[in-house]
Image (cartoon, helix red, strand yellow):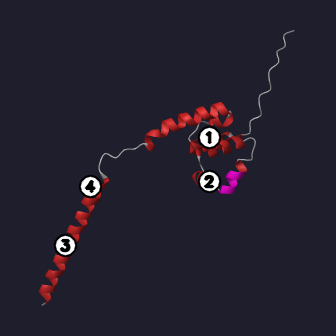
């Protein structure tokens, strides 16, 4: 007789895992609610549910920019790795560098506005001269 004991798998609480990930990523319930077309209260209730259907997990994972497995199999080490990788993947959008000098663009805009105003003044002066 060959019997092997397997350790019971730890009970996963999807809602609590969503809340932990959301807080670690600095995402507010209000933001998640707006992205999912829900209310903030619905997100709060979602975070209290032990088991969440896969379709909703996929939507939440997309908003948090983490894999669904992160929500399903959350533990401290995995969480750190997921967040570190997620941050690294999205870092290029955070470290955007302008290829132009914004001050030059402001000066260019100011000069165009100034030219337009000068043209308006010249046109008004011409109209006044014609009426005299």
Q: Which residue is mark 4?
A: 104
- Percent x, y of residue 100: 29, 48
Q: Which portion, as a residue range, is magenta? A: 39-44
- Residue at image coords 23%, 64%: 112
Residue 52 at least partly seen: no
Q: Residue furthest top?
A: 1
Helix, strand, or loop for circle 4? helix
Observer-side mark, 3 or 4, equals: 4
Quarter of the rendering occupied by the C terminus? bottom left
Helix, strand, or loop for circle 1? helix
Q: CA distance from mark 1 to mark 3?
A: 57 Å
Q: Which residue is mark 1?
A: 58
* Dots 3, 4 in contact, CB < 8 A: no
Q: Is residue 69 magenta?
A: no
Q: Is residue 43 magenta?
A: yes
* Dots 2, 3 in contact, CB < 8 A: no
Observer-side mark, 1 or 2, equals: 2
* Dots 1, 3 in contact, CB < 8 A: no
Observer-side mark, 1 or 3, equals: 3
Q: Residue furthest bottom?
A: 132
Q: Which residue is mark 3?
A: 118
């Amino acid at each position: 007789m060959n019997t092997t004991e397997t350790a019971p798998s730890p009970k996963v609480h999807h809602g609590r895992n969503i809340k932990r990930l959301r807080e670690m990523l600095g995402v507010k319930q209000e933001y998640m609610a707006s992205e999912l077309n829900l209310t903030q209260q619905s997100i709060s209730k979602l975070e209290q549910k032990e088991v969440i259907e896969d379709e909703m997990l996929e939507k939440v994972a997309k908003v948090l920019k983490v894999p669904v497995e992160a929500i399903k199999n959350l533990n401290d080490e995995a969480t750190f790795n997921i967040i570190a990788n997620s941050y690294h993947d999205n870092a290029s959008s955070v470290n955007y560098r302008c290829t132009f000098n914004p001050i030059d663009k402001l000066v260019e805009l100011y000069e165009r506005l100034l030219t337009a105003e000068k043209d308006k003044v010249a046109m008004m002066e011409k109209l006044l001269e014609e009426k005299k």
